[in-house]
Image (spheres, helix red, strand yellow):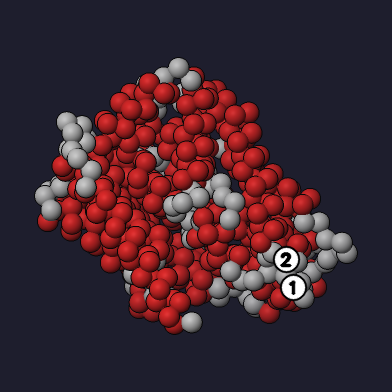
Amino acid sequence: MSTAVDKKKLIMWLCVIIFPLAILCIPTTAVFTAPIRLFLAVTLCAILMFAFELLNNAIPGLLLPLSYMLLGIAPGNVAFSAWSGNVPWMIMGGLLIAGTFTRVGILKRVAYWCIIKSGASYRGILFGLWLTGLILSLAIPNQAFIPMAALTYGICIALNIGKSPEAAGIMLTGAIAAIQPILFIYNPSYAILEGAAFSVTGTTSSWLQYFYHNAPVLVWSLFLVFVVSIMFKPKTPINGKDYFVKSYQELGPMSFDEKKAVLVSFVLLGLLLTTNVHKIAAGWCFVLVALLMYLPGLSLANDDDLRTLNFPFVIFVAGCIGIGSVASAIGIGDIVSDLMLPLLANMGTTGILMSVWFLCVALNLLMTPLAIWSLVAAPLASVALALGIDPSVFLYTIFQGTDQIFMPYEYASYLIYFSFGLIYLKDFIKLFTVKTILNAIFMVVILIPYWHLIGLI
């Protein structure tokens, strides 16, 4: 077994070395310059390390900007520019808030309350999970997927639902409820995509602007839960109201720390809603609120919350954002724009956006969403500007496209739910294939016309 694993890793390491070397063997031209060739080789090497998970992601995350600088591809202020922006710090703040809220127990209380209010039948559980995901996403944007995964697994076990379509319905509704809100509630994941394109666009979104531009996705996420309830309808009725009422009662009265967590949630939401007033970027609001939890008088977070913070992931994200910054600095965005403009110019806005959507769906089969965002954000933003389209529309379309998957490996957040072992692979593929088809229809029939209606395009 060990030999097989070693052989597999050896093949992966050979790919990490051979493919970048193959790029270095390509002759340079007036367009394909030596710096661009070196950039592509270094970037591919790091992306393959990410994809094969050969090292802790923090290692290639640090190697990327360091290599860009030491090899003379870009100066240090460009290679490490992500750290001067708010995205890495926003992620740290969001992770810290989520970890603290999980520890004090407020997330579980919200979940039980939502499910009880929705009736706790099978369909009631699904819509209760959707409401839970929405509330948690307002409190801890983009950080609800892990507590929701644990919650849905616990529900299946408590209701004695083993590996089955019914379990798939509950688990995958939890995934939808936790992940879909990032498509309309401003969050660290979109900030990563926006940050990767910042060197081209020079702009960031506010919470209200992001929601306004993507409001139809709220209804889309609710519609997906309805689809799940139809596709995985149980053969015999399921009612868990007694279990949820009992579990909620066992939590007892809301603790003082839980009340402080609710206060912190409202402070964060208030800051995010008023960025146009106080002029503090949304990313820094997460950091301020996270630090607020340590101040005397509130004292909600503790040293354990800080010790459990996923710093390697933050370093990884900063390294990925650096790909876009360096790519723009050496002119790759202009090259991609020149190549794609003749292909897209006569397609019309819907054709252009759906081409971007299909590109991202296809890339998702080979790369993680984060790698795709890092790779295409800046070049496609350049294309958008050349076509006279607001780059944010391209970014929203990229976000939609990378959310469409067929297999669990394509998106780590969805993979977490599959890894609990309660979902048949055929059920996973069936739901997400239907979801992808429906999303293409949603883009063409609702979302793109909505962007026209509000004057975004």
Q: Is residue 371 visible?
A: yes
> Marks 1 and 2: CB-CB under 8 Å?
yes
**Can you say whether 409 is above or below 192 in the image?**
below
CA gap between label 1 and label 2 equals 7 Å
For the residue labelled by badge 1, is the local secondary structure a helix, a strand or a loop? Answer: loop
Q: Position of residue 427 (x, y in %)?
A: 70, 58
- Name the foreground residue: 270 vs 327: 327
Question: To which residue does mark 1 refer?
Answer: 162
Quarter of the image holding residue 309? bottom left
Above or below for 170 versus 224: below
Vertical relation: 308 (above or below) 438 = below
- Give amino acid for label 1: Gly
What crowding class fits label 1: few (fewer than 14 Cα within 10 Å), some (14-19), or many (20 or more)?
A: some
- Give residue 167's mark: 2
Q: Residue furthest top?
A: 346
Q: Amino acid at mark 2?
A: Ala
- How far across and how far down the image is residue 205, in percent? 39, 39
